[in-house]
């Protein structure tokens, strides 16, 4: 079976059958609604909403968008050769990438190509997606000209319909946290009380619930491997069934515990932030940055070179 057929079969099958986790979050199932391409001309960031995806697509663009949605929600099953662990894109980009303060994907398309400090380069959206494939999914880069990559891009473009180029939407990224220090000892106890019932005692995940550390988790090069980024995600989104019940300090404590645990390596990570300015909580050494308490890394077993997304050549910034 070619990987293409494989992806289509899994993506389509999985989307129809497996929605229970998402239903558990009490959201409206957008895939069940009929498409409504908005006809609005003006754009107001306070009232704008991403359009719903047509679950019975009848033109090539809608088919591509629908496949893209299936691929980001069932990434591991649809693209097993490209995903290293137990996560899907929507393990972090919650509610099909629509949840505020959970690194929403709505509106992102309008901000690419974009200069990223971590790469020291202007990158296209395909490279940004591949950073998440190689780092957050601890997997391999998906060819930019593949049907699957272009379906994911089509979905991202669709959920940015009417957002003007360069604009920002509500709840973008992960909310910035106050400068606190986490205590991993306290974090361990809080983890037992609040997280173990779903993510398991050893952080390896349970059934469809994704891993938080170990071989099946995100790599050390993922933003989620940084204490402050993880604390923000946890503060606003976890426990999954009771988000918002942990305070800032508790979120930092749990984040300190999780990010201290072993996880897959991210080949080439030492070249991040090539112009300096690495944030203090980055857990590996880069130019001019020494990591504080770096966790143990687990070597990538299959083709580590496929985990490196080379930065496109960029004109150096004037300093
Ligand atoms: C382990 C969690 C995690 C997983 C899994 C993950 N991402 Fe991300 N992603 C993030 C975080 C965190 C950011 C950065 C948010 C920030 O700091 O603004 C991000 C950023 C992005 C961005 C840029 C958003 C913007 O506003 O500039 C895109 C696009 C993206 N991810 C797509 C994907 C896709 C597609 C997948 C699956 C192939 C995926 N991500 C998997 C955590 C994850
Ligand atoms: C009721 C079950 C449940 C509880 C309790 C829970 N989670 Fe989650 N968590 C999930 C699910 C489900 C996802 C993936 C969301 C999806 O696929 O829609 C997730 C995703 C995550 C992710 C991003 C993906 C990954 O695997 O890295 C992190 C980080 C996370 N949870 C941390 C925590 C922490 C820390 C706690 C305790 C404070 C916690 N969770 C409690 C169910 C739970």
Image (spheres, rainbow, N blue to C red):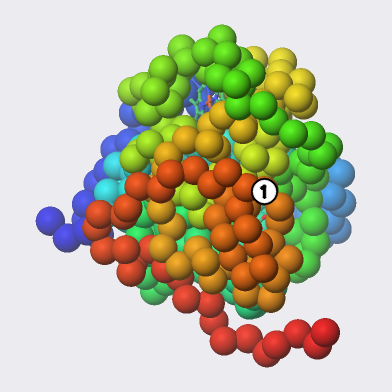
Residue 57 appears in the picture as rendered? no
Residue at left offset 62%, top offset 47%: 292
Q: Quadrant of the N terminus?
A: bottom left
Mark 1 C-beta to ligand 1 under 8 Å:
no
**Mark 1 neighbour class, 10 Å CA radius: few under 14, some 14 to 19, many 20 or more:** some
Residue at left offset 74%, top offset 48%: 172
Q: Quadrant of the C terminus?
A: bottom right
Residue at left offset 32%, top offset 63%: 304
Label 1's element?
A: loop
Question: Which residue is at the front of the view, 242 or 64?
Answer: 242
Residue 316 appears in the picture as rendered? yes
Question: Which residue is at the front of the view, 291 or 251?
Answer: 291
Left or right relative to 35: residue 112: right
Quadrant of the rendered structure where residue 56 is? top left
Is residue 225 placed above or below 277 in the rendered structure?
Answer: above
Give the x, y percent position of residue 135: 47, 54
Left or right relative to 275: residue 188: left
Q: Which residue is mark 1?
A: 281
Is residue 75 placed above or below 61 in the rendered structure?
Answer: above
Left or right relative to 155: residue 267: left
Give the x, y percent position of residue 63: 42, 55
Left or right relative to 232: residue 151: left
Q: Residue furthest left?
A: 1
Give the x, y percent position of residue 168: 80, 56
Give the x, y percent position of residue 129: 51, 60
Count of numbered marks = 1
Is residue 318 placed above or below 150 in the rendered structure?
Answer: below
Residue at left offset 62%, top offset 33%: 256
Quadrant of the rendered structure where residue 20 is? top left
């Amino acid at each position: 079976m070619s990987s293409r057929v494989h992806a289509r079969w899994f993506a389509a099958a999985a989307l129809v059958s497996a929605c229970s986790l998402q239903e558990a979050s009490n959201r409206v199932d957008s895939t069940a609604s009929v498409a409504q391409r908005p006809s609005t001309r003006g754009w107001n960031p306070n009232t704008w909403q991403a359009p719903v995806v047509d679950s019975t697509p009848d033109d090539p663009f809608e088919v591509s968008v629908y496949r893209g949605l299936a691929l980001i929600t069932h990434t591991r099953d649809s693209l097993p050769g490209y995903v290293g662990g137990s996560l899907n894109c929507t393990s972090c980009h919650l509610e099909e990438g629509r949840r505020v303060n959970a690194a929403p994907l709505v509106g992102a398309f309008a901000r690419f190509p974009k200069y990223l400090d971590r790469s020291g380069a202007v990158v296209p959206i395909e490279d940004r997606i591949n950073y998440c494939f190689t780092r957050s999914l601890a997997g391999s880069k998906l060819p930019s000209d593949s049907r699957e990559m272009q379906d994911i891009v089509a979905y991202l473009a669709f959920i940015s319909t009417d957002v003007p180029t360069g604009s920002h939407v509500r709840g973008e990224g992960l909310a910035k946290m106050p400068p606190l220090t986490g205590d991993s000892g306290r974090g361990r106890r809080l983890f037992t009380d609040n997280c173990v019932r779903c993510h398991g005692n050893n952080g390896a995940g349970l059934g469809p619930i994704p891993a938080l550390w170990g071989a099946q988790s995100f790599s050390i090069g993922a933003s989620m491997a940084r204490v402050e980024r993880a604390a923000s995600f946890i503060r606003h989104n976890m426990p999954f069934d009771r988000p918002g019940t942990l305070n800032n300090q508790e979120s930092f404590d749990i984040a300190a515990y999780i990010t201290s645990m072993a996880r897959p390596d991210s080949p080439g990570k030492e070249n991040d932030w090539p112009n300096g300015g690495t944030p203090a909580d980055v857990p590996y050494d880069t130019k001019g940055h020494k990591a504080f308490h770096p966790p143990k890394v687990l070597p990538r077993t299959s083709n580590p070179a496929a985990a490196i997304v080379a930065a496109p050549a960029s004109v150096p910034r004037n300093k």
